[in-house]
Amino acid sequence: MPQSPHHNHRLDWARAIALLAVVVIHTKPFMSSLLINQQPWIGMLMNQLARFAVPLFFVIAGYLIQPRLVQSTAITLRSYSRPLLRMWGLWTLLYLLLPFNLKTLGSEGYLVERSNYWRHLASAPLDSLLEGGMVHLWYIPGLLCALGLTALLVNRGWLRWLLPMSLALYLLGLLAGSYQSLSGIDLGITTRNGPFFSWLMFALGFEARRRRWQLSPYTAMAMMLIGMNIHIFEGLALSHFDVDFISHDFLFGTPLWGMGLFMLLNALPDTDKRLPFKLSSEDVLGIYLCHMLVLIYLFNLAGMLELSPLLRDVLITPLTCVISWLWVRGIKLTPLQLLVTRQTA
C-alpha cells in the first residue's frame, strides 16, 4: 500500500465520486418518476448504490490521520477537532435560522415557518444534539466521536482493542437501527448518529495504514462487490419486515463494501491524472456542508416553476453539485471563508 507523502490523486477522485453519491442520496432522483410496477425501483436502487460514500469518507479520514494521531495524539486531536467543531457550529446556526419552505414563509411568516422546524428538532433532542441544525451534519460529530475514541485507545496503548470494540459498537448500532424491528433493541436514538457506525469505518482506515494492509486489485474488487451485494440483499430482505428499503445508511455488508473500494483504490497503479476541476479536500467538506441548503431551495424553485417530476429529477442532482461548488469557491474569497475552511483565523 502506498505510504509516500506525495499527493494521492486517487483519493481526490474517490472524494469527488463519494461526494456525488452523497448528493444523490439527498436529492433522491427518480423517486416519483420512471416507475416500474408503480414502484420507484430506479430511484431506490440509485439511493442504496450510493451508500458507499460516507463509509468511504470515514475510511479515508482514518487512513490519512493515522501517522499524526500516533505520533502526537493530543495535539492532533485538538488541531483536527477545533476547526471541525467551529464549522459544524456555524452551519448548525445557519440551518436553524434560514427558512426552508418559501411558500410557508410567504403566507404565514418567518416565525411560523421556523417554529415548525424547531419543534421537529425538539421532538428528538438527543438526535438533534448529535446532528446539529440539519440531518446531514451528523457526519462531523460522528467523525469526531471516532477520532476521540481512537485517540483514547492510542493514548492508553490499547490499539489491539480498536477493531473489536468498534465492531461491537457497529453490531449494536445495526441491531438498534435497521434491524430494530427484528431485535427489539431500542436505544432511544438514531444509531447512525454518534460513534456506532463511524468508529468502525474510521478504525478500518486507521488500521489499513498502521498495519500496511494490501490486497490485489481483483481481491479488493471481489470484496467490494460482495459487500455491495450483501448490502442490497439485506435492504431487500428487511423490506419484507416493513423497513423502508432506502432508509439504510449502514448494514452488515457496508463495511466490506466501503473497505473493498478503498483497498481497490490503493491497489491500483498510482496516477498523476488530476480532476478536470479544482476540488480540494476542503472544497469537498464545504460542498458537503452547504449542499442541503442548495437542494432545499432548488426544490422550492422547482415547485414554483411547476416542473414535471422527470425534469426535476434529471436537473436536481447536477445543479446541486455545480451551484454548491461555485458557492464554496466564492465563499473562500470572502471573510465568510471560515464556513468552508479549517483556517483558525
Image: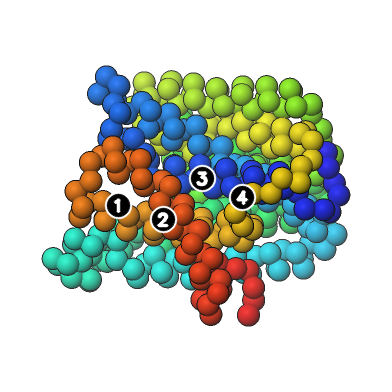
Q: Secondary structure at mark 3?
A: helix
**Marked residue nearer the N-terminal end (2 or 1):** 2
283 and 212: which one is in front? 283
**Marked residue nearer the N-terminal end (2 or 3):** 3
Residue 266 screen position, x and y as percent: 76, 38
- The answer to whether 156 is drawn above or below residue 181 in the figure is below
Q: Residue at x 57, y 53 (%)?
A: 142
What residue would you read off at disc 4?
276
Q: Secondary structure at mark 4?
A: loop
- The answer to whether 151 is drawn above or below residue 183 in the figure is below
- Kindly report the distance in space between the C-alpha atoms of the residues bearing marks 3 and 1: 18 Å
Residue 329 screen position, x and y as percent: 54, 65
What residue would you read off at disc 2?
292
Q: Residue at x 60, y 65 (%)?
A: 84
Tell me the mark number nearer the camera, choosing from 3 and 4. 4
Amino acid carrying mark 1 in the image: Phe
Amino acid carrying mark 2 in the image: Met
- Kindly report the distance in space between the C-alpha atoms of the residues bearing marks 3 and 4: 15 Å
